[in-house]
Image: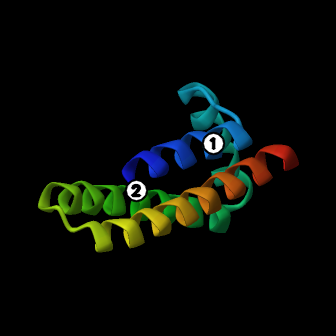
Amino acid sequence: MTEKFEEKMRLLHQDYGQLTPEERRRLLEGIRRKNILAFRKLERLKHELLRMETKRVQLRLAGNEKELQLLEARILRKKEEFLRGLFKTKRGM
């Protein structure tokens, strides 16, 4: 599943495009100024993604494939939600 996960993650980034760290920082600052609730939602999603990525590494090292597959599916859904929110506000700015 991990190879599929990496491929799906790559496709997700291709669909939404790439941002440089400077562009992302500027975009998040604009979101924070204009819509604090959307900013907090994006920050919460980012924190959840980091937590789930850590859990994914732990499960991968432990060899728990069933839980790993479920977690990778959740990560992909959250990542898509994060990117959708980020780029939706980018188009609105």
- Mark before the other along the chain sequence, 1 or 2: 2
Task: Identify the element where label 1 is drawn.
Answer: helix
Query: In the rendered image of this protein, does residue 37 appear above or below residue 21?
Result: below
Which quarter of the picture shows residue 84? bottom right
Coloring basis for residues: rainbow
Where is the C terminus found, in terms of image quarters? top right
- Residue 73 is situated, as x and y percent measured from the top left of the image, at 48, 66
Mark nearest the camera among 1 and 2 is 2
Query: In the rendered image of this protein, does residue 18 appear above or below residue 58?
Result: above
Dot 1, how many residues are within 10 Å of its Cα: few (below 14), some (14-19), or many (20+)?
few
Which quarter of the picture shows residue 3? top left
Q: Which mark is residue 1?
A: 2
Residue 22 appears left or right of 27 = left
Task: Identify the element where label 2 is drawn.
Answer: loop
Residue 17 appears left or right of 1 = right
Residue type, mark 1 in image: Leu
Q: Nearer the viewer, residue 44 or 6?
A: 6
Q: Nearer the viewer, residue 10 or 85?
A: 10
Q: Which mark is residue 49?
A: none
Q: Please name the residue shown 74% across and 55% down the image.
A: 34
- Residue 14 is situated, as x and y percent measured from the top left of the image, at 67, 37
Q: Please name the residue shown 17% across and 62% down the image.
A: 63
Q: Which mark is residue 11?
A: 1
Q: Please name the residue shown 22% across and 57% down the image.
A: 60
Residue type, mark 2 in image: Met
